[in-house]
Image (spheres, coloured by chain):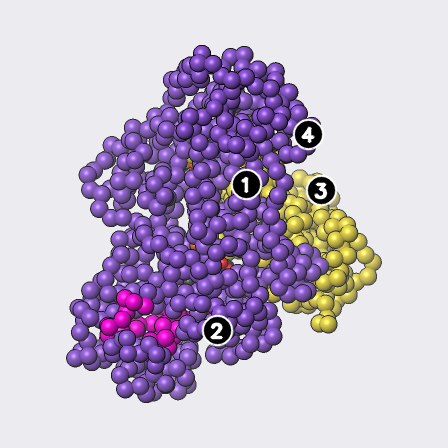
């Protein structure tokens, strides 16, 4: 039999929620290790190896030392997969990009002397693809386990993974939800990439856009809907800050 | 036929429903409240039924064409073990409104045609429909204008609230039987019958939304306004979310996906709702999107409802439920509103039809989703991208195709893709296809070896009607992979048994680069035949490439045609190539004096089902997979979306 691809999982600035989703595959972890060898996965195992084919990377890049480490991962890996909102687009970590790094440090650490400490040497948050080329994206905060599986099986079979390029509303409608707008709430579903099975509106809470915007927030159609529901551009801008700060939209083919 | 009407007290009706639930023979489904709206769901008690509802969020189509439905289960270890998984649990759905009953009858026309969908059929057969006359009118509904507020057909039983009792109209024997078995009913008196009429009339007055144009006139109104600015104006505020198609009872297009288990041992082929408002709906492997502009998609949806399906089936494919009006955030999806707006611009002209009627014989009847197993016999790599495959059907039955037809090739775990058949018809299970690598299925196919298994559905599509070519001079023009089906046609007419039916033959063939010329052996053979003129060109040629022939686009070959050979009125021209080629080549043919009705083309569109169900391949009102891929240009030019 052909040798199984060797997989390593890494994390940067994040909450490890996406890694947890992988760890939570439970019995299916056995299926996973039937098709790949996991050689490094800090959250669940002690071993570590630098000999891997596929790197699954979670988290955002905040510091020069992160950048260096990510480059080295990229050099080792044939395939690099960005895992979760933090890695694919910066996610919540980009909220901080509203302010200058120096001001943020002052706000958080006050007058403490951080000079020369590279752990605190932060720049504006970056997604992985702002530093190195990324081969595959698994969106979401956290990721959807089924989508993770479908991306992994696609790669194992040599296919291009199918990531939806249509909005969350499609899945939301299939779930027969009452639209959040009808309930007087404000939802980013119409401009957010589907693939999460519209989990938020299905549990009666509006979409926050964690899988990335597929339409600009300032297009005519969005304005029309905002007008109709007596919302302003400021409302949507604020709403997009959570996951999409500084990002206009994902490209159609990303 | 006069329908029997019974009455049942409301209390007895509850008992009837509760008995059905307890009995367990059927899964009992009924309308229930969902927040401040309504939905069909499995019923646990008659008390949860809300027969006074206005409209459900989703129509009952979800029980016949579910959001996600497993079509096949396959194994990736033992290739070509695929099994259909039909649902056979019997169901009763209680509380379906007349417009939704009518929508199901419309869906029947589409899914139960000659190429029947066995999944849909089984679900229809196993489901009993208990309709209910509308009591509350949804704010956006215009069913009264569509004549779908009441119905005499489409139900097994129909309830009408007549005060203390329900009147029960019996629609079918199945309905009658279940009533006999589980309910206590009385015959309806003439007073009861009058009460039904009164109940319906009272509701009729509640409709706020009215369409100004009679539904039989929608078709011509739309045609007259095909190029109206309204499409673009409204598309500007469209979110491309396809909510309008998801919630619509008469939208039934679908996509098919492969779902593979994490251990790569088995998988399912899943069909799921797709929507023509989504950009990817018409996207093909090369990256081209046939309805790229939102305006085109937005217009397509209305034309499908008001013109394409009416021309095909004789009904307007909108039943006025108003769901799309509720679902569309910018509120541009409601046909009532759109038609009324267009009514202002009603102009007389209604030239142009967007539908080609053609009754094809259907070769493969019955199972439409399950591929036949076949074995790859030979693989010949033609160049970096193209490979030629010789395939044999494992049941050893002849493929039985006509030139111009195609097959759907299935690779479990990867999907399905259509390919033209490149060998001439013959009494054999062996045939050839040429595959160019562009995406998942094609790349995987090109990695397969002799002995590997693939699945085959088909032959599909219409193919060439050879009779129309008889007695004529034949001018074949092909570009790129267009040579694949063309080769089948050429070798068929060159077959000694067939040859004398046709006059001279001219073959023009263009490829991008010398190395992309396929079937060079055939070309060399054709060149040697005395009454065949065969000319080749390549768009471009690097100095490193060895090419002694002509360079330039395919159109540069036309001056080489020996004009004396060409009795243009008695010439049939066949053109197959990439989409960009057609316009230019057709112009050359017209310059040669060949009438439009003598020109045949074969078109490519995104395909999934290949049997006129999934909707992907539509050019205006035409299903390329069924009415095509071969079209007469004289007819085709009526279709603005074609070339
Ligand atoms: C009538 C007909 C005849 C064809 N004949 C040939 C041929 O002889 N040789 C050849 O190499 N190609 C042919 N094609 C094109 C071929 O079908 C596509 O290249 C192929 O479907 C791409 O599949 P994929 O999975 O590799 O690509 P992906 O981009 O991964 O496509 C995913 C799916 O979309 C659909 N799709 C994508 N592109 C097309 C397309 N161009 N046409 C229809 N469906 C598409 C298929 O269902 C496909 O599985 C033909 C297409 C049609 C419609
Ligand atoms: S994407 Fe969300 S869940 Fe995943 S690591 Fe980042 S914050 Fe956590
Ligand atoms: S709730 Fe959100 S995702 Fe769902 S249909 Fe409404 S806008 Fe779209
Ligand atoms: S609904 Fe929106 S916020 Fe929720 S998981 Fe999906 S994309 Fe993320
Ligand atoms: S087009 Fe709209 S109103 Fe007409 S049937 Fe569909 S959802 Fe109902
Ligand atoms: S018409 Fe409305 S519902 Fe339909 S795709 Fe456009 S915005 Fe969505
Ligand atoms: S309708 Fe499905 S491919 Fe034509």
For this rendering, which residue is in front, A174 or B631? B631
Q: Label 1 marks which chain's residue?
A: B
Q: Would you place residue B523 above or below residue A84 in this image?
A: below
Could you say whether the residue bearing mark 3 is in a helix, strand or loop? helix
Q: Position of residue B493 (x, y in %)?
A: 33, 76
Judged by depth in the image, the label closer to the viewer, 3 or 4, is 4
Q: Residue at x 70, y 66 (%)?
A: A5
Locate residue B122 relative to residue A51 in the image: left or right: left
Q: Position of residue A170 (x, y in %)?
A: 52, 42
Which residue is under mark 1?
A: B125
Q: Of callouts 1 and 4, which one flags the residue occurring earlier in the amino acid sequence?
A: 4
Query: Is residue B480 covered in magenta?
Result: yes
Residue B428 got which mark?
2
Q: CA distance from mark 2 to mark 3?
A: 80 Å
Query: Tell me, what hue is chain B?
Result: purple
Residue B23 got which mark?
4
Q: Which residues are magenta?
A: B466-494
Q: Position of residue A178 (x, y in %)?
A: 55, 31
Query: Tell me, what hue is chain A?
Result: yellow
For this rendering, which residue is in front, B443 or B521? B521
Q: CA distance from mark 1 to mark 4?
A: 20 Å
Q: Residue at x 34, y 41 (%)?
A: B314
Ligand 6, image quadrant it occupies: top left
Locate residue A101 relative to residue B276 in the image: left or right: right
Could you say whether the residue bearing mark 1 is in a helix, strand or loop? helix
């Amino acid at each position: 039999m052909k040798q199984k691809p060797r997989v390593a999982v890494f994390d940067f600035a994040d909450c490890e929620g996406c890694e947890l989703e992988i760890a939570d595959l439970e019995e299916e972890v056995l299926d996973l290790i039937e098709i790949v060898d996991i050689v490094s996965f800090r959250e669940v195992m002690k071993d570590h190896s630098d000999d891997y084919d596929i790197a699954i990377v979670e988290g955002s890049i905040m510091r020069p030392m992160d950048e260096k480490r990510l480059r080295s991962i990229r050099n080792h890996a044939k395939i690099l997969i960005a895992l979760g909102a933090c890695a694919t687009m910066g996610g919540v970590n980009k909220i901080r990009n509203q302010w200058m790094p120096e001001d943020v440090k002052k706000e958080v650490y006050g007058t403490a002397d951080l000079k020369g400490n590279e752990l605190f040497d932060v720049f504006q948050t970056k997604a992985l693809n702002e530093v190195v080329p990324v081969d595959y994206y698994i969106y979401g905060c956290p990721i959807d386990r089924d989508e993770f599986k479908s991306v992994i099986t696609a790669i194992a079979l040599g296919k291009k993974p199918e990531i939806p390029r249509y909005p969350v509303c499609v899945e939301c409608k299939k779930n027969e939800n009452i639209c959040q707008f009808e309930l007087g709430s404000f939802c980013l579903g119409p401009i957010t990439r589907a693939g999460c099975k519209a989990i938020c509106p299905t549990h009666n809470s509006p979409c926050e856009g964690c899988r990335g915007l597929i339409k600009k927030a300032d297009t005519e159609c969005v304005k029309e809907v905002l007008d109709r529901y007596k919302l302003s551009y400021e409302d949507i801008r604020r709403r997009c800050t959570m996951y999409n700060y500084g990002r206009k939209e994902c490209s159609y083919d990303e | 036929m006069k329908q029997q009407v019974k009455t049942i007290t409301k209390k007895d009706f509850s008992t009837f429903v509760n008995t059905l639930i307890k009995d367990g023979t059927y899964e009992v489904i009924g309308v229930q409240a969902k927040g401040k709206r309504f939905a069909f769901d499995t019923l646990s008690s008659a008390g949860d039924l809300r027969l006074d509802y206005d409209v459900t969020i989703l129509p009952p189509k979800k029980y016949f064409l579910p959001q996600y439905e497993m079509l096949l289960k396959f194994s990736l270890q033992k290739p070509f073990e695929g099994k259909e998984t039909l649902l056979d649990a019997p169901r009763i759905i209680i509380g379906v409104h007349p417009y939704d009953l009518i929508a199901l009858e419309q869906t029947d026309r589409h899914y139960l045609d000659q190429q029947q969908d066995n999944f849909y059929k089984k679900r229809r057969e196993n489901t009993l429909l208990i309709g209910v006359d509308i009591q509350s009118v949804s704010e956006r509904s215009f069913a009264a204008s569509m004549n779908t507020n009441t119905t005499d057909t489409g139900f097994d039983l129909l309830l009408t609230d007549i005060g203390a009792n329900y009147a029960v109209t019996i629609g079918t024997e199945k309905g009658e039987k279940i009533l006999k078995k589980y309910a206590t009913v009385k015959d309806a008196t003439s007073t009861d019958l009058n009460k039904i009429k009164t109940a319906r009339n009272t509701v009729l007055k509640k409709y706020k939304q009215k369409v100004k144009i009679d539904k039989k006139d929608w078709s011509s109104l739309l045609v007259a306004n095909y190029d109206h600015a309204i499409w673009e104006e409204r598309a500007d505020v469209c979110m491309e979310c396809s909510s309008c198609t998801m919630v619509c009872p008469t939208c039934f297009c679908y996509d098919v996906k492969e779902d593979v288990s994490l251990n790569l041992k088995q998988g399912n082929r899943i069909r799921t709702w797709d929507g023509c408002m989504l950009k990817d709906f018409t996207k093909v492997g090369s990256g081209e999107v046939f309805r790229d502009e939102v305006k085109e998609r937005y217009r397509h949806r209305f034309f499908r409802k008001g013109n394409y399906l009416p021309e095909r089936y004789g009904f307007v494919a909108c039943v006025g439920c108003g769901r799309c009006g509720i679902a569309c955030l910018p509120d541009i999806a409601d046909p009532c509103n759109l038609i009324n707006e267009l009514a202002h611009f009603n102009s007389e002209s209604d030239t142009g039809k967007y539908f080609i009627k053609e009754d094809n014989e259907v070769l493969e009847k019955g199972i439409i989703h399950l591929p036949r197993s076949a074995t790859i016999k030979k693989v010949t790599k033609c160049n970096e991208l193209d490979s030629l495959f010789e395939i044999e059907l494992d049941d050893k039955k002849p493929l039985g195709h006509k030139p111009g037809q195609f097959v759907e090739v299935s690779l479990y775990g990867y999907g399905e893709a259509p390919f033209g058949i490149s060998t001439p018809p013959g009494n054999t299970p062996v045939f050839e296809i040429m595959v160019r690598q562009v995406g998942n299925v094609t790349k995987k196919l090109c990695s397969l070896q002799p002995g590997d298994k693939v699945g085959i559905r088909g032959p599909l599509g219409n193919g060439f009607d050879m009779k129309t070519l008889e007695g004529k001079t034949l001018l074949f023009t092909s570009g790129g992979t267009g040579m694949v089906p063309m080769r089948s046609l050429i070798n068929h007419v060159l077959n000694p048994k067939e040859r004398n039916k046709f006059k001279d033959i001219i073959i023009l063939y263009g490829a991008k680069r010398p190395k992309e010329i396929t079937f060079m052996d055939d070309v060399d053979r054709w060149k040697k035949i005395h009454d065949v003129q065969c000319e080749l060109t390549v768009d471009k040629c690097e100095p490193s490439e060895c090419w002694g022939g002509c360079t330039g686009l395919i159109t540069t070959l036309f001056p080489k045609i020996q004009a004396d050979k060409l009795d243009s009125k008695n010439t049939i021209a066949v053109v197959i190539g990439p989409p960009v080629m057609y316009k230019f080549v057709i112009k050359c043919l017209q310059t040669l004096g060949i009438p439009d009705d003598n020109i045949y083309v074969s078109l490519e569109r995104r395909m999934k089902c290949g049997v006129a169900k999934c909707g992907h391949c539509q050019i205006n009102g035409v299903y390329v997979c069924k009415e095509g891929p071969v079209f007469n240009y004289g007819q085709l030019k009526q279709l603005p979306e074609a070339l």
